[in-house]
């Protein structure tokens, strides 16, 4: 692991009014509740400050990892190389731009924007209710569920590029595809997005949100730490079904387990390390390949 000098960055972040934490356990910032420490975690309090932090990282050649709500990542037990730019706290503005368009900053939780849409009787975001991510993470991943996807409603995304400058993408530039976007390739930091929704009926929107949340509670192992579906959906079926057919429900390595409730979820069953989870991901991948001829690809993103 490279040695970084955090003092200048820390002072710069404090000068900009950002929140700063040192030697932070990533267990506290990921829904898997695993991972080593990061030396410095900065929560930018404004988009301008975020740009300045990126410029300062470039100047000092310090690598940075962007973290939203940590609900789709597995952080190495050895911790992270460089600093963490934590988006899910500071960038929290949300507003209506017109009758049917919501603008919100990247740190806003999906639950918050779903409720804001409901308050304004706007339909289109119901599918996202219950996904425990931030808007930035959801756009990055093109998060989706129950037939909906970010790409159907996100029309414009604002970012800070690799030089620390502001910009935005629309339409094809966004590069949305199944659980990916242009941001996976370019490394830019998403700062906000516009959501184009439709006028709907308050009661119907609420009923749909309640129904979908109920389905999650029925099917998903929400009482254990996880990162949701561990694998992407293969072309020929559902990852969970293939894993179950291989008899892997309940399979454990260390403290990691293939959920008994939903085989598509690997859970932190009993003080798992990220290494336990990674070994189980490899074991499941190899077994499903051998027995079903299907290649599983992780949806979870590995950070080191
Ligand atoms: C119980 C449970 C249920 C889930 N259900 C679903 C589901 O139904 N559908 C679904 O699609 N996902 C689901 N997920 C996975 C996860 O919630 C989504 O992928 C979510 O969108 C990730 O957002 P996040 O803010 O937590 O991102 P993080 O996990 O923090 O980050 C994910 C990736 O995005 C990058 N990133 C985050 N924020 C930014 C930003 N502002 N700019 C640039 N890059 C950024 C990170 O570097 C990382 O590579 C579930 C997870 C859990 C734990």
Image (cartoon, helix red, strand yellow):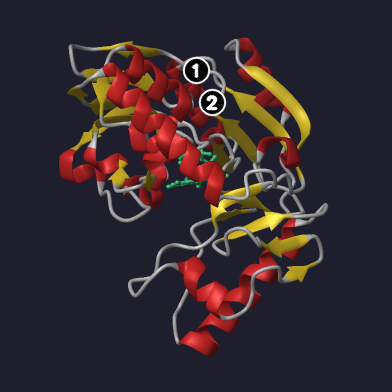
Q: Nearer the viewer, residue 114 or 23?
A: 114
Q: Secondary structure at mark 1?
A: helix
Q: Is residue 151 visible to the viewer in this orientation of the structure?
A: yes
Please tell me which residue is depicted at 25% across the width and 26% down the height of the picture: 123
Picture disc at residue 184: none
Please tell me which residue is depicted at 61% across the width and 40% down the height of the picture: 62
| Vertical side of 275 occupied by 205: above or below | above
Please tell me which residue is depicted at 62% across the width and 11% down the height of the picture: 15
Q: Nearer the viewer, residue 113 or 260?
A: 260
Dot 2, how many residues are within 10 Å of its Cα: few (below 14), some (14-19), or many (20+)? many
Q: From the viewer's perspective, is 199 left or right of 137?
A: left
Q: From the viewer's perspective, is 234 left or right of 200?
A: right
Question: Which residue matches tag 2?
Answer: 53
Asked whether the residues under the numbered discs 2 and 1 touch, taking CB atoms below 8 Å apart as contact, a structural biologist would say: yes
Q: Nearer the viewer, residue 62 or 97?
A: 97
Residue 58: % across, % down: 52, 36
Picture disc at residue 49: 1
Q: CA distance from mark 2 to mark 1?
A: 6 Å
Residue 136: % across, % down: 43, 33
Which quadrant of the figure contains the N terminus? bottom right
Q: Nearer the viewer, residue 166 or 19?
A: 19
């Amino acid at each position: 692991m490279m040695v970084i000098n955090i003092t200048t960055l820390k002072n710069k972040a404090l000068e900009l009014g950002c929140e700063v934490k040192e030697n932070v356990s990533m267990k506290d910032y990921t829904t898997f509740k695993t991972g080593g420490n990061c030396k410095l975690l900065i929560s930018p309090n404004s988009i301008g400050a975020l740009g300045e932090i990126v410029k300062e990282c470039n100047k000092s050649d310090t690598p940075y990892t962007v973290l939203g709500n940590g609900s789709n990542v597995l952080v190495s037990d050895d911790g992270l190389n460089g600093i963490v730019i934590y988006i899910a706290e500071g960038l929290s503005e949300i507003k209506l731009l017109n009758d049917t368009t919501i603008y919100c900053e990247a740190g806003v939780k999906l639950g918050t924007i779903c409720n804001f849409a409901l308050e304004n009787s706007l339909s289109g975001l119901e599918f996202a209710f219950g996904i425990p991510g931030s808007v930035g993470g959801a756009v990055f991943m093109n998060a989706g569920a129950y037939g909906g996807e970010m790409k159907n409603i996100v029309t414009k995304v604002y970012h800070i590029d690799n030089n620390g400058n502001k910009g935005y993408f629309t339409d094809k530039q966004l590069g949305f595809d199944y659980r990916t976007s242009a941001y996976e390739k370019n490394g830019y930091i998403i700062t906000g997005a516009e959501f184009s929704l439709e006028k709907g009926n308050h009661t119907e929107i609420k009923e749909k949100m309640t129904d979908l949340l109920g389905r999650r509670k029925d099917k998903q192992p929400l009482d254990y730490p996880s990162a949701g579906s561990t694998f992407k959906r293969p072309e020929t079926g559902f990852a969970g079904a293939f894993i179950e057919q291989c008899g892997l429900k309940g399979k454990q390595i260390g403290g990691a387990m293939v959920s008994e409730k939903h085989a598509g979820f690997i859970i932190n069953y009993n003080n798992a390390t990220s290494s336990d989870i990674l070994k189980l991901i490899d074991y499941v991948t190899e077994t499903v390949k051998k027995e079903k001829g299907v290649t599983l690809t992780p949806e979870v993103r590995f950070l080191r």
